[in-house]
Amino acid sequence: GDEYFLLRFFKTLKCFRCLWILSAKDSVAFALGVVERVGTNFLLVLAAELFVLYCNALLATKFIGGAAEFATDTIVREQYGDLTKSLSTLFQLCTFQMTWSESVGHVLREGSSYVTTYAWVVHVECILVFAYLWFVVVMGGVFKALQDEKRAEEEAEGARRQQSVDKAMRDFLKKNAGRLHGDEYLSDDDGAANGARAKGDSLGELKKEPEFYEASL
């Protein structure tokens, strides 16, 4: 989770650092590349990007301020994971990558040699970041799928084991039903109490036998 926030922050710094050193003409070319690539959805994408950064800043603050609380807060952790997987993958790995490539193209065509060299360096760095992000997303998805499969197998094995234990216990109790219900103390009310007590004693004696212990394993 926190590596996504750090890489997203790194990517944003790259964008602003590039705009900071560009001249007015180069900045306009960069902005035109963004608008041309995204079109009328530019404001929507920008708002979504800022929303993702804002949410991750809040969550990172929570994580840094109270790591133990964050680790035990399953709701926040699940929301953070869903937010990272959906919005980060959609807007940052796809949209920003396309807009960045298009904007670099404008800078390379219209910028000076110094800006062109710097743009290439930043572009290569961002490609490496995107490649790492895709690796994290893909491997994270594969790892999660393997974990889900392992968890499902463990749950199925536990259910089968519980069924076999229940069956063994039923067979054992059925086999010893005569010892449990063969008491002859149920003739009157006092006898009923004695019979219930005798029944409990019989069950307690059965629980002490090795066969009962083996059936309960």
Image: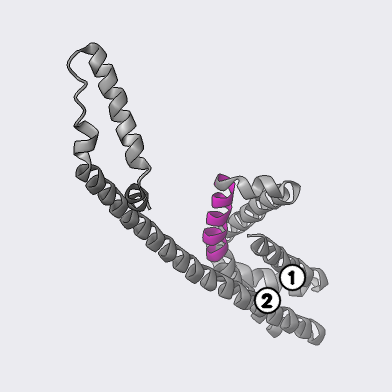
Instruction: Please indicate whether residue 15 sits to the left or right of residue 77 in the image.
Output: right
Residue type of the residue flagged with mark 1:
Lys
Q: Is residue 149 or residue 157 the one in the foreground?
A: 157
Describe the colour scheme in one phrase. one colour
- The residue lying at 53 percent from left, 73 percent from top is 139
Is disc 1 in contact with disc 2, using a CB cutoff of under 8 Å?
A: yes
Residue tagged 1: 14
Q: Where are the magenta residues, as a range?
A: 75-90
Magenta residues: mostly which secondary structure?
Answer: helix
The quarter of the picture where residue 18 lies is bottom right
- The residue lying at 25 percent from left, 42 percent from top is 173
Label 2 crowding class (10 Å Cα cut-off): few <14, some 14-19, many 20+?
some
Instruction: Please indicate whether residue 94 sits to the left or right of residue 194 in the image.
Output: right
Residue 49 lies, in percent from the top left, at 62, 58
Q: Is residue 154 or residue 12 the one in the foreground?
A: 154
Query: For numbered disc 2, what is the local secondary structure?
Result: helix
Q: Is residue 162 or residue 137 the one in the foreground?
A: 162
Residue at mark 1 to residue at mark 2: CA–CA distance: 8 Å
Residue tagged 2: 126
